[in-house]
Image: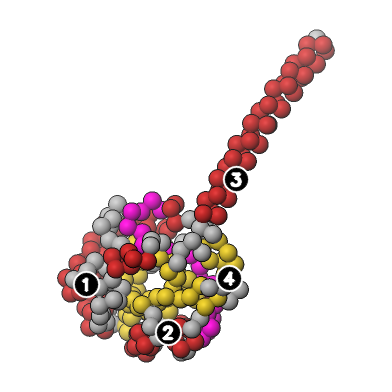
Amino acid sequence: MSRLVLLLYRKRKVLVWPFLALCLLLVGLWWQRSLEKVNELQWQFVNGYGIRIPLKYTVHGIDVSHHNSRINWKRVCQAQADGVALQFVFVKATEGATLIDRRFKHNWQEARKAGLRRGAYHFYHPKRDPEKQARNFIKTVTLQPGDFAPVLDFERNANGKVPADQLIADIRVWLRIVEDHYGVKPIIYVNRHFFKLYIDGNFDEYPLWIADYSTNHPRAFKAERLYIWQHNEKGSVDGIRGNVDFNVFIFEPDRLNEICL
């Protein structure tokens, strides 16, 4: 009996080693492909901005609001670190049905003077009337040729208190009114969670701006109309106080006009 047990044990050992070798091989292949995927975007830490940046992309930008206090736009437009210059900025314009960002007028004017391509965004409140929110944005923001299309910033749902079908219908109202006014489809800014819950499959015809700091590659979203990726929220820019959101345009520069007036 003891000999039989010993024989089985030895056979199991013989079988275990090939299995472990196969597992190690598969892990190695997975790791290699992950590195290739990351290296494809040429991630590099850029000291001047204090973050890693995917240098494969050539069009980089930021977004700002009153939270960034008074901005020195002359210094911002001169910002360049390791050959990476800032080329665009999105500025918060409105929020809800009545609020206008107190720094919008200054930021909007100065961004244009600084030579940056600019865009304006509306922070959407799910529990506010979508038509009033659209009118708030329209009466506040005058867009000119070359500016980005209007942006709907959707990142809140009152702890899930607004039903999905109502929320989706209300967002359509905002998008329709704003599109009719400016003659261009608005861009939808959304995080990974809300993209999966409300946007994916419902608003596929609209250009997308994704905020996701957890992935090394925007391909994870499998969204055909994904144009802009906010990849970091903790950058630093000379002329701006505090943390700054960093974004990249993920197509070739000549496709920027697809999401601009």
Mark 3 residue crowding within 10 angstroms, few (<14) / some (14–19) / many (20+): few
Q: Amino acid at mark 4?
A: Val
Q: Which residues are magenta?
A: 221-242
Q: Say which residue label 3 marks.
A: 31
Q: Which of 255/165 is in front?
A: 255
Looking at the picture, tell me which residue is in the foreground, 31 or 81.
Answer: 81
Decide whether residue 241 is among the magenta residues. yes
Describe the element under mark 4 as helix, strand or loop.
strand
Q: Nearer the viewer, mark 1 or mark 4?
A: 4
Q: Which residue is rendered at x = 44% and y = 73% of the image? A: 61
* Kind of residue at disc 3: Trp
Residue on which the image places disc 1: 178
Residue 234: name its quadrant. Answer: bottom right
Q: Are marks 2 and 4 in contact (CB under 8 Å)?
A: no
Which residue is the site of mark 4?
Answer: 46
128 over 5 or under it: above or below: below
Tell me which residue sits at (77%, 19%) in the image: 10
**Viewed as shown, does residue 193 lie left or right of 17?**
left
Q: Report x, y in % for residue 220.
A: 44, 52
Q: Disc 2 or 3, which lies upstream in sequence?
A: 3
| Horizontal and vertical percent position of residue 54 | 51, 63
Crowd rating for badge 2 (residues with CA inside 10 Å; few <14, some 14–19, many 20+):
some
Check disc 1 and report its element: helix, strand or loop. Answer: helix
Residue at x-position 23% and y-position 63%: 172
Closer to the observer: label 3 or label 1?
A: 3
